[in-house]
Image (cartoon, rainbow, N blue to C red):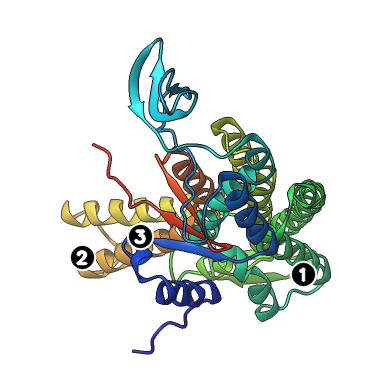
Amino acid sequence: MEERKLKDWEKNIQILFGKFPQIEKLIKNPVYHSNTPWAREANAYLLKSTGGLADGDFYRVIFKQGSAKSLMTIVSGELSGLKTSSVVEKGKITAVAGLEPVDAPAASNFLPMLLTMGMFGAIQHRLSYISNICTDIRNHQIVGDYARLERISEVILECFESIPEMDEKMMHLNLARMTSNTDECLDLVIIMREELSKESHTKPEQYRTFDRVNVEGVNQNGERFYYDPVAFVKQMMQHNVFAAYERFVAGKICQIALSGNYSASNIERSKQSVARIKDTIRKIFEARIKAHKEGAKEYESRISEYNDDHDTSGWSLLEWKQALVRQKGSIAEIEAQLYALLDAKLESFDSLSHLVNQDEIDVYLINGEIVINEKELKLSD
C-alpha cells in the first residue's frame, strides 16, 4: 500500500522535533504548524517583554468550560501582585487554569492572533475538504456558471489558507470579502436549485414507482416517452447545485474563522442558514423518494397476498422478495447519497462546536514557530 504523502506543515513539525526532541513528548497530537513573519515578531516581543531567554517557554491561560474567568492574585511576599493558576469565584478557589500571562501590550497585539491560529489549526485539520474544493471543481468541469463557481472557490481557498499570515486588519478586510463571496454563492445556489427543480419537472412524478420498471410520460409535443425513475434521481444528484451548496457551507465556515466569533449562537445561526437552503434542495427529491417507498409497500403487500394464496400475478414468492430487496436497496442508496451531499455538510458546524467546547487547544510558540496541539477526545458518558 502506497504511503500517504506528508503535507508541508507535517514535514515542518518533523524538522522541529528533530531540532528539539524533548518537545515531542509534550506535543503528542500536532494538527498544524506555521512560521509566519508575525509569529516570529510575537516570539521576539514576548521574550523581550517577559525577560525570557531563547530556550524559554510561553504559556497562555486556558480556562475549563463553564469555569469562572478570574485568577487568584498573590497579595503579599516576593511574588506579590502576580497572578496564579488558581481560578477564584466568590472568594473561593474553584478550578485550576494556566500560568502567568504576558503583559498587556503583548496580549492585546498578539494573543488574539495566537488564539485564532489555535482554532484555525484545529479547523483545517477537521475540514480538510475546504483545501480541496478548487482541485475538485477543475476536475469536474461545470458548464455555464463554471467561471462564477471557480471564482467563488478561489476566494474561499485563498482566504482560508491565508488565515495564518493575516494580521487583525487583514482579518477584517477578508471577512468583508468572504461575506460578499458567500452571498454571491448563495445567489448561485438558488439559481441552480431552480434549474434542478425545472429538470425534475421534465419527468412526471408518480404515486408509486419500481426498480427496473420505466415510467411513461408525455412531452410538450404530445409524444410519449419512458424513463427509469431510479436512474433519473441519480442523474439529478449529479447536478451542479450540490457543488455550489458545498462552497456555500465552506464560505460560512470561513466567515466564522475570519470573524473569530466562535460563540455557540453564532455557529448555530450559520448552521441554520445552511440548513434552510439544504431543506429546499432536498424537497425537490421528496416526492420521488416517497413514490419508491410506496413501491416497496406494494411489494410487501404482494408478498402478504402470496402467503395468503391470493396472488394472481404468476410471480413466485422468491421473485417478489428479490424485487423488494432491490427496491429497498435503491431507496437506501439514494437516501445515503443525498445525506452525503446535503446533511453531512452540516457536520462542519458540529465540529466547530466541539472544538469550542473542548477544555483546551494548545498553542505553542517555539523559536518563532507556532505548533497547534489538539487534546485527545474524551468520550462523554
Mark 1 or mark 2, earlier in chain: 1
Look at the image and tell me in which quarter the C terminus lies: top left
The reply to whether dot 2 and dot 3 touch (C-beta < 8 Å) is no
Amino acid under disc 3: Lys
Q: In this view, does 324 lie to the left or right of 171?
A: left
Residue 46 pos. (x, y %)? 60, 49
Res 319 seen here? yes
Between 319 and 329, the one lying in front of the other is 329
Please tell me the numbered disc located at residue 357.
none
Residue 174 pos. (x, y %)? 78, 52
Q: Is mark 2 on a helix, strand or loop?
A: helix
Dot 2 crowding, Cα within 10 Å, few <14, some 14–19, many 20+: some
Q: Mark 3 points at which residue?
A: 328
Q: Label 2, label 3: how many angstroms apart (C-alpha)?
A: 17 Å
Q: Label 1, label 2: how many angstroms apart (C-alpha)?
A: 53 Å
Please tell me the numbered disc located at residue 150.
1
Who's the residue at 46% across and 23% down the image? 80
Residue 85 pos. (x, y %)? 39, 32
Mark 1 or mark 3, earlier in chain: 1
Above/below status of 161 relative to 74 = below
Res 204 seen here? no
Q: Mark 2 points at which residue?
A: 317
Q: Label 1, label 3: how many angstroms apart (C-alpha)?
A: 38 Å
Q: Is residue 376 left or right of residue 114?
A: left
Of badges 1 and 3, the one in the foreground is 1
Between 193 and 374, the one lying in front of the other is 374
